[in-house]
Amino acid sequence: MMRQPAASWKTAILLLLLSLFVAFVAARDFRVMNAPDVFAPAEGFARKMLSEYFPPLKGTTADTPVFIREGKEPGGTVLILGGTHPVESAGILAATLFLENASVPRGRLIVIPNANAMALTHNSPQEGHPQRIHFALKDGSTRVFRYGSRATNFTDEWPFPEIYVHPASGQKLSGKERSNLNRCYPGVPDGSMTERLAFAIVELIRKEKVDLAFDLHEASPEYPVVNAIVAHERSMELAAIVTMELEGLGIPIRLEPSPKNLRGLSHREWGDSTDVLPILMETGNPSQGRLRGRTDERLVLTGEDKAYVKAAALGRLFIPYEGNQLIAYRVARHVTAIRVFVENLEMVRPGKGVTLEGIPQYEEILKQGVEAFLKPVPKKREV
């Protein structure tokens, strides 16, 4: 029996050590995804946890911060939900701008920046997404937001069934949709983790008697329902008023009715299960599309993609596209639409108006960027 040369053993040991080093670095990098995003709420916001509305969430990765600010004058209650799908960054950032800038003289404002915290702890396999995006502030500090995944982390939602049967309707979907928060409403108190999360959010809407609720999303430019408002029939009157006002401001936006036979989505189930006026909004984001090239932080922030330039020239897109879709533009659309909705709430719910001040205007966000309205965060502690 021939003895293997010593050089081969040295090579094997070297490769083993190298593999262990790579595994260590990768594990450390992915472990950072479990560290929660840090926010700097404006003065007057109280911090709660979603588990206060549904105690079984306490101590789980589904629990997430809920920020509430109550005005001196009585009025209605508005809920802003970002992060249903954490890869749709404009939703998280728009919610954050309200959290960090809004004062509320009348009524109440509730903000949940990271609705599906479980989806923020990992990336989508094979999508090549960045783990986080960065914004440089004027004081020299940097705000960091995790990019996450569209779906709940597999460690929280496993195994998937081959077919997901929506509990409230019996509608059949792909098994992986059970990990999609926006297919699980109105939720199940003893269901999967994503179903429990959905149940907790609906419980919050019920217990806080929310009048108007927003679920903020982004969609690919080739998707028909993009740069759009999707409204439950109870919300349609208000949504029509807002759509016309936005058009007058030079912000074209589609108005889509919530399909009654498409179940599990916020714009349908919130309205059917509670007295709230539900609104889902979509902005156009090339990093969500199938035509995109390299998916990195630059694409998320700028929306610049050569393939989409060609697709626009061929008339294949459902948004105007001239080479980019800046994050500032996408956030500005969300923020401005919410502001207009809130300004008109009193028209459809007398006595339930809400007044918000300190919110940046559309042109201000476009000119100064999102980073101009993000606050420096306290060091070494979560707010």
Image (cartoon, rainbow, N blue to C red):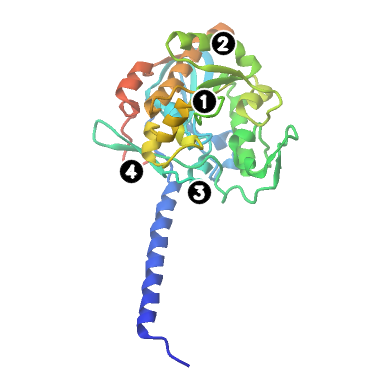
Q: Residues within 10 Å of mark 4 (few under 14, many from 20)?
A: few
Q: Nearer the viewer, residue 162 or 272?
A: 162
Mark 3 to mark 2: distance in Å? 40 Å
| Residue corresponding to mark 1 | 282
User: Residue 95: x percent and y percent?
Assistant: 45, 27
Q: Which mark is residue 362?
A: none
Which label's residue is closer to the chain start, 1 or 3?
A: 3
Residue 93 seen anywhere in this rendered image of the structure:
yes
Circle 2 is placed at which residue position? 240
Residue at the spot of label 3: 126
Residue at the disc numbered 4: 380
Left or right: where 133 falls relative to 317: left
Where 103 sits versus 61, above or below?
Answer: above
Indicate the amino acid at tag 1.
Glu
State the separation of the CA atoms marked 2 and 1: 16 Å
Other-residue count near label 2 (Cα within 10 Å), few / some / many at <14 / 14–19 / ≥20: some
